[in-house]
Amino acid sequence: MMTRKDKKHETEKVLDVDASMQGTLIFKDYVNLRINGTFEGVLNTKGNLMIGEQAVVNADITGDSIVIAGKVNGNITALKDLKLISPARVIGDIRSPLLSIAEGAIFDGTSRMLTKAHDLTNNTMTPDDLAKYLEIETNLVHEWASSGRLPATKDGDAWRFERAKIDEWIAQGKIK
């Protein structure tokens, strides 16, 4: 007899990547993702993310539960928890409601312990933040926002961008 838990595990998506990749990866569905190679760009996941010991990642990462054993250079937002295990080496800022750093792991940056999922999922970005996130020039962000091509709100004279809306915009292929 198959239980509900067994059915869940049967339908879970597992992706084990041992390659060199560059770009923006967004997973809208739950996935167990393990990166063992190199990755550069932006990584957005739902589910579990494991950065293996041999992995080298130069990316801003957003995910639910994240475990890092390799090298990461970039900002990390974990919606549930983040674990750095030896020999992890993380250079960047961390935002997570739960952070664990094991002996032997190295962390160089700032951490912000958040307790509300709302603070993590409804974060806003400045044009400079968004330009870095999209890997484009800041003047292009201003141009797209002014023309209505990009989901944005005006706060006085400054543009603000909600990460969730930007991720949806990217997933719809409107970044072309």
Image (cartoon, rainbow, N blue to C red):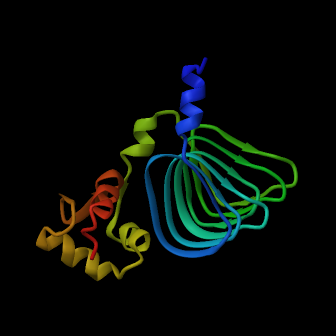
Question: Based on the displayed image, in which of its 4 quarters is residue 98 positioned?
Answer: top right
Q: Residue at x 36, y 68 (%)?
A: 130
Q: Residue at x 59, y 58 (%)?
A: 93
Question: Based on the displayed image, in which of its 4 quarters is residue 21 positioned?
Answer: bottom right
Where is residue 123? Give x, y as percent. 38, 49
Query: What is the quadrant of the C terminus in the image?
Result: bottom left
Q: Is 139 left or right of 108, judged from the image as shown?
A: left
| Residue furthest left as drawn | 147
| Residue furthest top as drawn | 1
Question: Based on the displayed image, in which of its 4 quarters is residue 120 positioned?
Answer: top left
Q: Is 94 left or right of 136, judged from the image as shown?
A: right
Against 154, residue 121 (above or below) is above
Where is residue 148? Give x, y as percent. 13, 67
Where is residue 119? Give x, y as percent. 42, 41
- Residue nearer the viewer, 76 or 114: 76
Against 19, residue 66 (above or below) is above
Q: Is 53 left or right of 125, judged from the image as shown?
A: right
Where is residue 126? Give x, y as percent. 34, 64
| Residue furthest front as drawn | 1
Query: What is the quadrant of the N terminus in the image?
Result: top right
Against 139, residue 3 (above or below) is above
